[in-house]
Amino acid sequence: NAGVMQNPRHLVRRRGQEARLRCSPVKGHSHVYWYRQLPEEGLKFMVYLQKENIIDESGMPKERFSAEFPKEGPSILRIQQVVRGDSAAYFCASSPFSQNTGVWSTEAFFGQGTRLTVV
Amino acid sequence: GESVGLHLPTLSVQEGDNSIINCAYSNSASDYFIWYKQESGKGPQFIIDIRSNMDKRQGQRVTVLLNKTVKHLSLQIAATQPGDSAVYFCAENSGGGADGLTFGKGTHLIIQP
């Protein structure tokens, strides 16, 4: 859905560099989710954030990955010291509610993704 | 045509025919399921959802069937059109504090003229 804006759309980084992926949710949405998609695979949940809080990071690698959703500004997914295995499409989704209320159908939307390539 | 989404990644159907895409899920605690459509270079787009207290739900040209006994979900697309060409994913949510959706690997639907 065009309401969730992710940038950049494509990002190339050399091994060892940092990657910063941005997600601006639909206006008024306070819940943000990050997913990673490897080629020919389904999306894998990484982290769920509300404004200034990480609610569930059970899908985040323990090292090098971090996420934030500040009071003002976009949500950021940060990958430090990138390796080739980090190459993937990273999708952000936003919702006005928690997923547990089952409102994904009409109120939650995915962005177009950021395609990270590590060379 | 019929496919098991996790074992047959591609389904080819004639334009105008009905398509059936299948998905097996593993978590018996899952209580909410969604089908997504993903076109090349784009993010997933919601198609239809179903809760575990239902076994069938219909939308515009699409029907989702849920068989909890065998943990099986299917998406039926009536009168398949060229614009239906995409990868289709089933996703499940177990609730109970687990906020992330679990996606299947997807089935690539190819429409032949």
Image (cartoon, coloured by chain):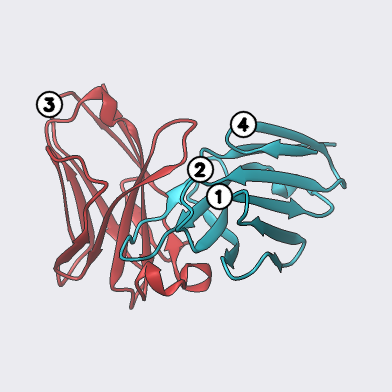
Chain colours: A red, B cyan
**Residue B22 horizontal/vertical position (percent):** 66, 44
Q: Chain of mark 3?
A: A
Q: Pointer 2 and pointer 4: residues touching (CB < 8 Å)? A: no
Residue B104 shows which numbered tag? 2
- Residue under disc 4 on the same chain as residue under disc 3: no
Q: Pointer 1 and pointer 3: residues touching (CB < 8 Å)? A: no
Q: Is residue A2 left or right of residue B39?
A: left
Q: CA distance from mark 2 to mark 4?
A: 11 Å
Which of pointers 4 and 3 indicates the residue nearer the eye? 4
Q: CA distance from mark 2 to mark 1?
A: 6 Å
Residue furthest out toward the front: B69
- Per the image, label 1 sits on a secondary structure element best described as strand
- Residue under disc 4 on the same chain as residue under disc 1: yes
Please say if B56 is above or below A113: below
Give the crowd class for mark 4: few <14, some 14-19, many >=20 residues within 10 Å.
some
Q: Label 1 is placed on what type of residue?
A: Cys
Earlier residue among tags 2 and 1: 1
**Residue B27 horizontal/vertical position (percent):** 46, 50
**Residue B37 horizontal/vertical position (percent):** 59, 50
Q: CA distance from mark 4 to mark 1?
A: 13 Å
Q: Label 2 is placed on what type of residue?
A: Gly
Residue placed under numbered mark 1 in the picture = B90
Q: Pointer 2 and pointer 1: residues touching (CB < 8 Å)? A: yes
- Residue under disc 2 on the same chain as residue under disc 4: yes
Residue A16 shows which numbered tag? 3
